[in-house]
Amino acid sequence: MTDIILLTGFLGAGKTTLLNRLLSGNENPGKTVGVIVNEFSQTGVDGQIIQAPSGTSLVELNNGSIFCACIKDHFVDALIDLAGRSLDLLFIEASGLADPANFTSILEGIKKQTKDAYRYLGGVCLVDALYFPKFFSLLPALKRQLLYSKVVLINKADLVEPAQIAHCLDLIRETNPAAAVYETSYCRIAFDQLYQDLTPSRDETEGGEGAAATGRPALDSTNTPETRPKTLTIHPAKAIEMGQLKALLAGLTPHAYRIKGFMMTTEGPCFVSCVGEEINIQPVDKMGGEASLVVIASVGIKIISLATAEARKYWGDDVQIKVD
Amino acid sequence: MGKELIFETLRHQKTPSVPWVPFAGVHAGKLKGYTAEEVLTDGEKLFESLMEVKKLYAPDGLPIVFDLQLEAEILGCELLWAKSNPPSVKTHPLAGGEYKIPCKCEIPKKDSGRIPMILDVTKRIKKEIGDTTALYGLICGPFTLASHLRGSDIFMDMIMNEQYVKDLVEFCGEVCMAMADYYAEAGVDVVALVDPLVSQISPDHFEAMLNPTFTACFDYIRSKGLFSSFFVCGNASLQLEVMCHTKPDCISVDENVSLPTAKAITDKYGITLAGNIPLTTVMLHGNQQDNMKCVVDLLDSIDHHNFILSPGCDMPYDVPIENTVAAMQAVKNTEVVREMVAGYEAVDDSIDVELPDYANLAKPLIEVCTLDSESCAACTYMWASVKDTKDQIFGDKIDIVEYKYTTKDGIARIRKKGLTNLPTLCINGEVKWVSIIPSRDELVAEINKLL
C-alpha cells in the first residue's frame, strides 16, 4: 500500500521547501518514496531544486495543472506507473494555482489499473502568511486548496505581525474548521506530527476513500485550460549584472504572481524566487539547468509585451521569450 | 528567391529588388473558375487556386486565405455568403445591452469551423512551394473581430464603457494568438493581423483601448519565430503612428493612404511598409497599362528599402487576370515597363451622373460612400450603423443610400462629390464623417438637427 500526501499552496508559499524537508532521510527512515512535482510553466524549476535521496522515484509534470484536462492524462499515467513500484509514500506537489477538488475522483477512476495500491492520506495546504489574505478572495483555487486539506501550515509566520496570523487563521477556520492548523517558519514541522494528523481515524476509513481524505465529496476542478494564467519563460543568452537583474525583477513583479528560475549573473549563478513583489535572489554553487526565468502572470496577455520589453532592456536581442 | 526576398525585407535588410505579394483572396478562385464561397470552403479548390496564383502571378509571398469572418463564424456570427466576395457577418452574438465576454473555452480550436481545411491546405502548399514562397497566415485582427461579435454597439462602448472594450479586445487577442499557433504549426512564415476597422477610430482610442492587445499579439508572433504584419484598410493616415507603437515587423496600407507619407512614418520606426495598388479604379476597372503605370509611379514615389509592393487590400474577385500580371511585370521588370508606359495617359471612361438636389430634399438624406459594404469591414460597419439608426429610430423620416466604389455609377458619384477617402458619411450632401464610424448618439444628434 502506498500512502499519498498531497501538498498544495499558492505560488511561493513554500511547498518545495516542505517537500525537501519531508524527503530528507531522517524524516522517513527506511521508506521507499516517490514524488510527483507539478508546475504551470513549460520549464520546470522545482524539479531542479528538489533534494531527493537516491532511490526516490521523481516525476515532473509541467505545463499546466495536474487537475486540469490539459495534463490530467499524464498525471493519471504517472500514478498508474508509480503504483507498480511498491512505494511506501508518494508526495504530490501541486502547482500553486491547483484546485484539487477532483483528486479523489481521479484516484477512484484508476483503482483497477493501480490494483488499489493507493491510500490517500489527505492534503497539506501551505498558506503564505505574507500574501494569503490578499490573494484568497481573488483566486477561487486557494479556497479549494483549503477546503480539501486536512492540515494547514501558516508558513513564513516569522515575517508577519500576530494580527496578520490571526487574519489568516480566521479565513482558514471560516473555510475549513476541521483542518489541523500550525504556524511555521521555513516549513519546520515534524513529519510524525503531520503523519499522525493525516492518518485516517477508524470512522473516516469506514466512509470510503473520498470521505477518508477530507470528509468532502469530490467536485470538478476549477482548473481548466481556460482559467490557466498566462505563463512564459525568459531565456537569456548571456549573463546579467546583479543590479540589472534586480531592476528586471522589480519591473516584472507587479504583473506576476510568481517568478522563479536560475540566472547567470556577472557575479555568478543564482536562484531567483519572487512572490508578489517580494524579490529573493540567492547565490548558488552551480546552475540547476539552463538560465531561465519562469513568469506566471497576474495580468493576462499583456505580460508578453511587458516581459519582452523588460528583457530587451537588459539583453537586447540576446534573449528569447517562450510563451506557454 | 522570393521567400528570401520577403525575409530580408521583413528583417529590414537591403534587398536587390522589391518583393511582390498579391493579395489574391477570393480572386484566387476566379483563376480556376471557382466562386468565392467554393474557394473558402473547399480545400481542394483552394489548393488548386493557390497553385494557380503561384503559376500566373509569381508571388514572393502568398496569403493562404483572406477571410476576416473565419474566426467570427466559429464564435457564433452568422455569415452571408456571396459568389464573388468573401462572406460578410450577418449577426452579432454579443450585441445588446449586456456587456458579455465569451468564455475562453470558446476560443477556436484546431478542429473548429473551417480551420482544419485551411491548415491542411497550408501544409500542402508549404510542401509544394514553401521553399520558394513566403506563406502568409491572415487572421482577423482583434478589434475587427470584437466588432463582428458586438456589432456597431462597440463604437458606443468605446465612449460608455472603455474597460469592456479593452476586455473584449483582449479576448479577441487570445483568439489571434491561438490562430497564430495553428498557422505556425502548419508552416506559415508571416502572420498578419488584418484589422480594417482600426482606421475608423481615433488614435487616442487606439492607444487607450487597443494598443496593449496588438502589442502583445505581435510580440507573441515574434516569440514563435515568425514575422508579423499589421494590415489596415481605409484612411489610416492618422492611425499609422500609433500602429507603429505596437511594433509589428510590417504595416500594410491601402490606396486611402499616401505611400510617401506612410513610408516616412514607418521608416522612423524601422518597420516595413506594404501597399498599395488601388483595388477598384486601377486593378478592377483599369487596363494593363493603368496597372503598369500605377506600379511604376508607386515605386518612383518612395525609397525601396523596407518596402513590399502589394494591392491595397484583398483583391476584388473580378480583377482581370491580365491586370495583375501587368502589375507583377511592373514590379519585376520595372525599367522595361517604364519604357512601355512612357507617355501613357489614362483614358477617362467615367460616366456622367446627377447628384441629388440637396437644397430641396423632402427629408434628410444620409449617403454612405463605401468601397463596398459587402467586402470591406469598415464600410460594413459604417453602412450598418446608418441602416440600424434608420430601422430602429427614424424609419421613413429619413432616406439612406450607399454608393459603392466597386461600380462605375458609384465611382462617378463619389468622384463628383469630390471625395478622396472611403468610407465617408454625408448628410444632405455635406461630409460629416471621413473614415470614422460615428457612435449611434452622434449620428442621431446630427440627424435631429434637420428634423
Image (spheres, rainbow, N blue to C red):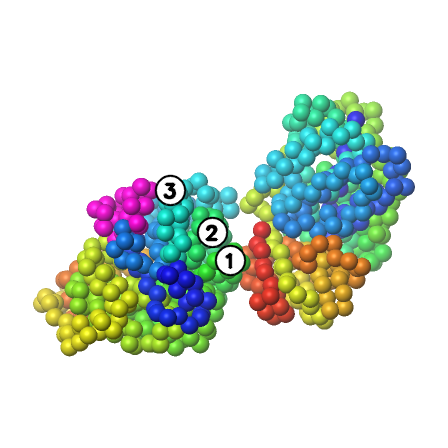
Asked if the residue at tag 1 contacts the one at tag 2, i.e. Cβ–Cβ closer than 8 Å, the answer is yes
User: Label 2 vs label 1: CA separation?
Assistant: 9 Å
> Image height check: is B177 above or below A33?
below
Q: Chain of mark 2?
A: B
**Residue annotated with mark 3:** B117
Query: Is residue B37 located in the magenta-colored stretch of the structure?
Result: yes
Snapshot quadrant of residue B314: bottom left
What span is colored magenta in the figure? Answer: B27-51
Q: Name the residue nearer the viewer: B368 or A37.
A: A37
- SS class of the residue under badge 3? helix
Q: Is disc 3 in the same subunit as disc 2?
A: yes
Residue lying at 71% horizontally and 70% vertically, measured from the top left:
A241
Snapshot quadrant of residue A263: bottom right
Snapshot quadrant of residue A29: top right
> Image height check: is A39 above or below B334?
above
Q: Chain of mark 3?
A: B
Q: Residues within 10 Å of mark 1 (few under 14, many from 20)?
A: few
Q: Chain of mark 1?
A: B
Q: Residues within 10 Å of mark 3 (few under 14, many from 20)?
A: some
Q: Name the N-terminal-most of marks 2 and 1.
A: 2
User: Label 3 vs label 1: CA separation?
Assistant: 24 Å
In this rendering, would B391 be left or right of B141? left
In this rendering, would A313 be left or right of B292? right
Q: Residues within 10 Å of mark 2 (few under 14, many from 20)?
A: some
